[in-house]
Amino acid sequence: MAFNKIWCTVALGLLLPVSYAHTDFFTSIGHMTDLINTEKDLVVSLKDYIKAEESKLEQIKKWAEKLDQLTDTATKDPEGFLGHPVNAFKLMKRLNTEWGELESLVLKDMSDGFISNMTIQRQFFPNDEDQTGAAKALLRLQDTYNLDTDTLSRGNLPGVKHKSFLTAEDCFELGKIAYTEADYYHTELWMEQALKQLDEGEVSSADKVYILDYLSYAVYQQGDLAKAMMLTKRLLELDPEHQRANGNMKYFEYIMAKEKEANKSGTDTEDQVEKETEVKKKDYLPERRKYEMLCRGEGLKMTPRRQKRLFCRYYDGNRNPRYILGPVKQEDEWDKPRIVRFLDIISDEEIETVKELAKPRLSRATVHDPETGKLTTAHYRVSKSAWLSGYESPVVSRINTRIQDLTGLDVSTAEELQVANYGVGGQYEPHFDFGRKDEPDAFKELGTGNRIATWLFYMSDVSAGGATVFPEVGASVWPRKGTAVFWYNLFPSGEGDYSTRHAACPVLVGNKWVSNKWLHERGQEFRRPCTLSELE
């Protein structure tokens, strides 16, 4: 208890995020590219300011050099120098006029242009919430893809084009953000990484005393008293007068003495048992483990017998007139639930048109709240999305028609085409597309019934990560630009197929663009007739 009281001064002293109107930059690479251009503009403005300052200093330097020579000559023989009437006149002129001009030049503020540009651009800057979101994304990627802190800090990621690394100060900031979230597991990892880089000789503004302060508390919160004492001793070696560390050390020694007494008496306190059984890393649910394994490509492998039932084919949409002479390429991705992929189904030109239409409207992606039936943002869905109607563009209309022709389903009752861009660590954790029995009002406002099927376009390749995974069955579908996948969410009976529970894995490296069409029950009565069995 004493330790917690001592620590309160640190907790209260931490800077809390300021609330600004923000646009969740971290949730979309599309919007973050605008920040790159903003920063480039600021760099150009800064360089112009530097040139102006250099020009100003060059003028002052020339003036100083000229007067240095002149005053050297004049001070050796002042009377003789001033005996020349021109020298006397120029001295009066310099002191009365030219030194005043020099003073004006020295006082002239060359930063006006840069500061003005900075003020204008600042309104488009990310805020504390964006920085925290980007930090959480890194921690999410670390967990999902089993990345150790050193690998992430050194930037050794698969498929990277522009390698980058984290400084000790960056690692310290990540640790602090984890601390403010009471995530002591990641606090320990990143404070240790910051300390390691400083111990290796990295020059940094990060202070070992501050790092050890956070680290010792994070370790203590996870039940490792001996390590917390060791770290606190190291802190006191650097700063023997550190008030909080001295107080903490006394508290640790007191707790340690109590534990020794308990051990001698042969009894364990409840706290001791709890500490011994505590697991440092978060105890994820089985689905979470399966989800992360599938994201890493470590999922269940389909048996050879089942694989033999998967085929590729030319598909004409069940003799659809548009595809009889020019069928499309189709391949089976999974058998149960049946997931098929269409190849070369959307052109690069169509993709660019859809992206350009969507970019101005991208906003934080939402999910249906089963309690209210309304759309809301959620921490488990990190992306930005926009909705496109068929009447807005011939391209969108053509895409809608293509989906109808190849699925055989009526798109007039479908939702608009949703375009999504996933940002840093962008993901959508396991979810169902259809409304379950316990949320009967999920799509009541639409009046078109439940979501019978999902069509998903991949509009970009992804360097690493970003798979669509189905934890219930062990399927992983990887993004391939220009393709689309399709599956039914409901059985023909109208019952939900719970094996279609799926997720969008975090993007580790790259940029992920997708668009999807959710098709609804209304209008499909004769296109996909109902059966008598619930599971058919």
Image (cartoon, grey):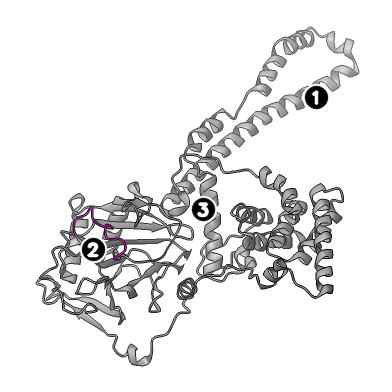
Residue closer to the observer: 71 or 189: 189
Reading the image, the residue beneath label 1 is: 68
Secondary structure mostly seen in the magenta stretch: loop
Image-quadrant location for residue 172: bottom right
Which three-letter amino acid code belongs to the residue tagged 3?
A: Gly
Mark nearest the camera among 2 and 3 is 2
Judged from the image, the secondary structure of the residue bearing numbered disc 1 is helix
Which three-letter amino acid code belongs to the residue tagged 2?
A: Asn
Residue visible at 72% across and 61% down? 220
* Residue 18 relative to residue 361: left or right: right
Reading the image, the residue beneath label 3 is: 133
Magenta-colored span: 437-448
Dot 2 or dot 1: first in sequence order is 1
* Residue 131 relative to residue 418: left or right: right
Q: Residues within 10 Å of mark 3 (few under 14, many from 20)?
A: many
Whether tag 2 and tag 3 are in contact, CB under 8 A, the answer is: no
Dot 2 or dot 3: first in sequence order is 3
Reading the image, the residue beneath label 2 is: 450
* Residue 400 relative to residue 352: left or right: left
Q: CA distance from mark 3 to mark 1?
A: 57 Å
Which three-letter amino acid code belongs to the residue tagged 1?
A: Asp
Residue visible at 80% across and 62% down? 255
* Residue 315 relative to residue 300: left or right: left
Dot 3 or dot 1: first in sequence order is 1
Q: CA distance from mark 2 to mark 3?
A: 33 Å
Q: Quadrant of the N terminus?
A: bottom right
Image-quadrant location for residue 182: bottom right
